[in-house]
Amino acid sequence: MIALAAPAKINLYLHIGPVRPDGLHDLASLFVFARDGDVIRVEPAKSLSLTMTGPYAPLLKDLPPEKNLVYRAAQMLAHAAGVEAGAAITLEKNLPVAAGVGGGSADAAAALNALVALWKIDIGEEALIRLAFRLGADVPACLAKAPVNVSGAGERIEQGPSLPPLWITLVNPRVEMPTGPIFRAFDKAYPAPPAPLLANFRAANYQQLKQAMQATRNDLEAFAIEKAPVIREVINRLAAAPGALAARMSGSGATCFALFASPVSASRAARAAQARGHWAMASALYVRLGDV
Ligand SMILES: C[C@@](CO)(OP(=O)(O)O)[C@H](O)COP(=O)(O)OP(=O)(O)OC[C@H]1O[C@@H](n2ccc(N)nc2=O)[C@H](O)[C@@H]1O
Ligand SMILES: Nc1ncnc2c1ncn2[C@@H]1O[C@H](COP(=O)(O)OP(=O)(O)O)[C@@H](O)[C@H]1O
């Protein structure tokens, strides 16, 4: 049996540009990953099957298997590599769904990595990235767990900066925020945005990290707040939490995050959010390549 973490993805910043001919937006982002999230387990089997466990599994139970990103990842990989064997896949779904923390993308990426190992497939990195991108714009970046600079619509990935040790608190006010409509609201407000630029995100220490966060933004935040004003309150509370270095929304929302230099401060902020009835999780971040 092979078990792989499918960690929560966080966009430390997210700069959005124009729509491309393929309908996706050009973007520039720094993706980082928490040490916790969903878990994928794969075992040899004659055919392909998917079992779901965990607190958010019930939200996906009505999704037909061929729409589940994990099952689709397995089917596409088997087809691309000419694999006849099956796999018994288990998805432990701990992350909220349609939440801006890339749960489905992380699951798909972990399933690809796990099945490449289980089926002993010799697939090059570039071919795996191309296959991942067909599953979802975020999936290629989720193949890595270290910080990555992401551009294109998600298919261009480069090693990101090393960061100081960081802990993160993720808070979701239990609002589902489908990604497509948020991009469409952005298009209405900015019919001709400039090309998005990767930030020169230097963050060798906490002071630089704070400055780098102040110099960047999440271009989708205002549009998610329009749909769910509670997001603004969540960000303000996180920013005011003792020890918070920065707070922002991730992806298209509604999950927001704060960064901390100490695990105790991160856990305290998560407990405060849970006491208000929100979903919250505190975790360490993968901050450099050697971490993973
Ligand atoms: C916004 C981001 C930032 O990391 O994250 P999430 O909020 O989804 O976690 C991503 O770009 C989301 O990636 P992902 O969730 O994989 O998107 P997909 O399933 O490929 O696309 C869902 C929809 O989002 C829009 N979309 C997505 C990516 C992109 N670069 N441009 C887009 O316009 C399209 O309308 C698309 O139909
Ligand atoms: N394994 C999966 N986990 C979560 N969502 C999935 C999965 N497979 C398919 N989906 C679909 O993908 C959509 C986006 O989910 P998710 O990746 O959690 O959100 P986001 O892209 O905002 O982070 C969900 O609404 C769901 O219908």
Image: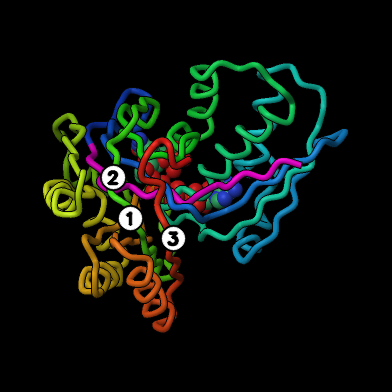
Classify residue 128 as left or right of residue 234. right
Which residue is painted at 55% across and 47% down in the image?
6
Element on which disc 3 rests: strand
Span highlighted in magenta in the image: 1-16
Name the residue that disc number 1 marks. Answer: 166
Which residue is painted at 41% across and 39% down in the image?
146
Which residue is painted at 18% across and 51% down in the image?
213
Amino acid type of the residue that numbered disc 3 sits on in the rendered structure:
Ser
Q: Is residue 15 magenta?
A: yes
In which quadrant is the N terminus drawn? top right
Q: Is residue 165 magenta?
A: no
Secondary structure mostly taken by the magenta-highlighted segment of the chain: strand
Residue nearest the viewer, comparing 36 with 218: 36
Location of residue 36 in the rendering, given as x and y in whole percent from the top left corner: 51, 56
Residue nearest the viewer, comparing 162 with 123: 162
Instruction: Kindly give the residue lying farthest to the right in the view shown.
Output: 46
Amino acid type of the residue that numbered disc 1 sits on in the rendered structure:
Leu
Q: Earlier in the sequence, mark 2 or mark 3?
A: 2
Name the residue that disc number 3 marks. Answer: 283
Element on which disc 2 rests: loop
Q: Quadrant of residue 268?
A: bottom left
Element on which disc 1 rests: loop
Location of residue 291 in the rendering, given as x and y in whole percent from the top left corner: 44, 42
Amino acid type of the residue that numbered disc 2 sits on in the rendered structure:
Leu
Classify residue 149 as left or right of residue 127. left
Q: CA distance from mark 1 to mark 3?
A: 9 Å
Which residue is painted at 57% across and 47% down in the image?
5
Residue 163 tag number:
2
